[in-house]
Image (cartoon, rainbow, N blue to C red):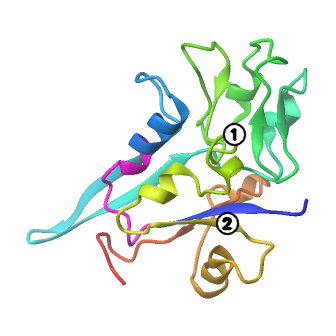
Amino acid sequence: MTKRYVLVHDENKCIGCQACNVACRSENNVPESVTRIQVRIEGPYGNFPHLHFKYNRVSCEQCENAPCVKVCPTGAAYVNADGIVSINEKKCVGCLYCVAACPYKVRFINPETRVPDKCDFCKETRLARGEEPACVSVCPTQALTFGDANDLNSEVRKVLDTKPHYQQKVNLGTEPRVYRIPSRKGGIKA
């Protein structure tokens, strides 16, 4: 793998505006009844007037050890050369094993194509043109950082090297490539 694309979601900068969701929906023609990405808003926490919220990104974690790929009987679920977990619609037989195997519960059946779908970092569109994923490009608070973690000079590498971060469900051995900078309290902070 020459590149290792990763995404960092800074929970301190996220304001839960859903611009990422809208941009993804538009860029990838995602039907209204489903979503590739969303930001779940939890809270409020604290006491008035010192309330805060927690913002959790919910999308494919782009696992390096992806359970969805392991269970696919036809090879329709696969990892491309850049490590992006992908789906070949032509090979899919609709068994839904990949949907059931995802420990993050982010795969869904696209009601128009009738094939499992999920975030793929806009690999067929924006990434193919050398652009960042739609969610990253529209974030008004720069809560998302995307890039090649193997590039020691990349912004995403600098963030990972200098900020405390975590990954979800690492105990499962999936090795997710979506990282989170933990919220200190909620809201926007430097």
Q: Amino acid at mark 1?
A: Glu
Q: Which residue has dot 1 on it? A: 124
Q: Nearer the viewer, residue 47 or 121?
A: 121
Point out the residue furthest to the front here. Answer: 129
Specify whether 48 is left or right of 129: left
The part of the chain drawn in magenta is 11-21
Q: Amino acid at mark 2?
A: Gly
The mark found on residue 147 in the picture is: 2
Q: What residue is at 80 percent from the left and 55 percent from the top?
A: 173
Residue 120 x/y as whole percent: 66, 43
N-term-proximal mark, 2 vs 1: 1
Residue 92 x/y as whole percent: 80, 17
Mark in front: 2 vs 1: 1
Q: What residue is at 39 percent from the left and 72 percent from the top?
A: 12
In the displayed structure, 126 sits above or below 35; it is below
**Quadrant showing the C terminus:** bottom left
